[in-house]
Amino acid sequence: MCGIVGYIGTRAASNILIEGLRKLEYRGYDSAGVATISEGQLNRVRAKGKLQNLQDKLDGLEDPARLGIGHTRWATHGKPEEHNAHPHTDGSGRIAVVQNGIVENYRELREALIAKGYEFQSETDTEVIPHLIADYLAKGVEGPLAHESDLLEAVRQAVNDLDGAFALAVVSADFSDELIVVRQQAPLAIGFGQGEFFCASDTPAIVPHTRAVLPLDNGELAMLTPLGAAIYDFTGRRLKKHPITLSISPTMVEKQGFKHFMLKEIHEQPGVVRTSLETYLASDWTPESDKSPVNLGLDASLLAGLEQVQILACGTSWHASLVGKHLLERLAGIPTVVHYASEFRYSPTPLIANALTIGVTQSGETADTLAALDMEQTRRVEKGDAAFAPRMLGITNRPESSLGRLVPNVVATHAGIEIGVAATKTFVAQLMAFYFLALELGYQRKTLSGQELAEIIEAMRQLPTQMEHVIEKQEGYTEELAHSFTETQDFIFIGRGVNYPIALEGALKLKEISYIHAEGYPAGEMKHGPIALLDAKVPVVAIAVPGTVYDKVLSNAQEAKARDAQLIGVAPANDPEAEHTFDTLLPVPTVDELLSPMLTVLPLQLLSYHIAARRGLDVDQPRNLAKSVTVE
């Protein structure tokens, strides 16, 4: 979850490191630090809190170093204090290390190092690493990479002692032209420039300098020098690898006039949906065509003869997957289950034949989702039965990520880089992926006629314009409404059917950025306990759209209103019954019920944003959270 950057080349490293950290601060902002090597000395500066605190310390300091590493932290071991901030050094202050991830066996390593006389200055797991490297160097390095570099070989031996998921960048004052980077179950990429190299936990820190990027795979380390990059596995074997060219540009990670990244990303959602439609729908398809209207680029055998779909996800991706379950069952007639990846990896369900397993993760780096997918793939291979063979599909915004290398089939969501920690445009992009998958399976399984497909597709093509209309209209409504909740401590969101997951997502967004306790419930479950929470101080947001459960949700809303709750409705405009039921109406256009989540989520995103902004909170970097959850 932390952010790592590194640089070696011909330019001053310090500014490059700080700007790289600024692009990665969404990954953690409890503390930050840099370490540079110049004239045989290691210089380290660290600061508690946001990156600006580190910037303030560095302002006015002259640092000509052309080698350095930096880190922005999401605290795991040890409180967010300066002495726990990265980079961490060995006892001599000659070796510095930054880490993303967790060293699970750090206690045993720490005790062994203390017994040898090493002293520790922090409570972190990371500090064992520079001491381990120093210990191997002190003993005299022997091994397969010693002929290349003593530091490289010492790092290789040290990482083989580590258990856990981690990515590292290492520098030493005694090896002033080497930057060593390591990846084991946590993301790290190398950027290739002209006579210079970069490393980072995520590509936004690299793209201002180069689009030629090489993501490391698990169990790999690299030595970067001004002359080149050499990649090895943990046994010391040299690997032949080639960089890829990213299509993103530096302007994608700028606010472009918006007050916050989250608000910018909410406004980008209609464009994301347009891109999805243009990418995956055949423009020349008609109901009489003898081909599918959807082109996901998937192998036909992946979807043939399916008996079940199981989806693994976390957080907002889990909510998108719940919508996906409705779509797959309603449109394609396939029984579908959705699991929290963090639970599934330790309590897997019995294997079912002819099942498609889908992993959904915005970053493609979510540790629990990757581990659950890997476990499922392995146990299906070990079954040794063709009917149980793994059919694995990933849905991600980053096809070049670990997910893209783990599973053979990926649907890219094309949302572009999302900086705000609270997912918005990536959520609707995931929904679009599920719509396309459900339509493809509906076509293949003949559960949808050509005319039904045509009607759904035509309605989907109207979504971007409808979304623009909702965002334009709701911006003012929700900003004004937010003034009413300055002191509110609890919210309840209710929905039914395909919009129950949207109630969950609305509650999560409010919790994430406003720190207001909020819960989402199926509307029909209110009377089974949660209704006891209601009074005049607890607003209720109800999602009510015409369809199979419209009247039911309105009735459930009336039950809340009878308990004095302030009732906010996400419901159709110009509907007398809705206007009569709700104290405040956040209107959305009337669309097919199955498509309605694409519209109903928008007022909830805006309401959460404006409540948090009204409270003066850090919308893009809410406390205790980070964008890419790369630890369990």
Image (tube, helix red, strand yellow):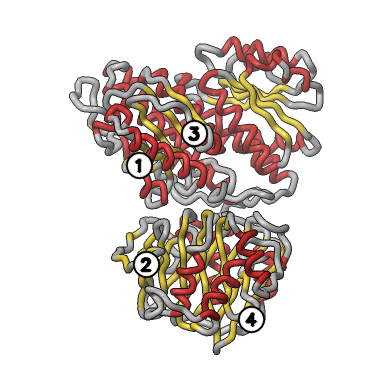
Q: Which residue is mark 2?
A: 232
Q: Earlier in the sequence, mark 1 or mark 3?
A: 1
* SS at circle 3: helix
Cα distance between the residues tagged 2 and 1: 27 Å
Cα distance between the residues tagged 2 and 3: 48 Å
Q: Which residue is mark 3?
A: 467
Q: Are dots 2 and 1 in contact, CB under 8 Å?
A: no
The residue nearer to you, when weighing 380 against 626, is 380
* SS at circle 1: strand
Q: Amino acid at mark 2?
A: Tyr
Q: Which residue is mark 1?
A: 410
The residue at 44%/26% (across/down) is 350
Circle nearer the viewer, 1 or 3: 1
Residue 376 falls left or right of residue 314: left
Q: Amino acid at mark 1?
A: Val
Cα distance between the residues tagged 1 and 4: 47 Å
Q: Residues within 10 Å of mark 3 (few under 14, many from 20)?
A: many
Task: Quadrant for residue 507, please give it.
Answer: top right
Circle nearer the viewer, 2 or 1: 2
The residue at 69%/64% (across/down) is 84
Q: Are dots 4 and 3 in contact, CB under 8 Å?
A: no
Quadrant of the image for the N terminus?
Answer: bottom right
Give how far across and how far down residue 566 sits, in percent: 75, 23
Residue 578 falls left or right of residue 133: right
Give the answer, above or below, for where 237 lies relative to 433.
below
Q: Which residue is mark 4?
A: 92
Cα distance between the residues tagged 4 and 3: 59 Å
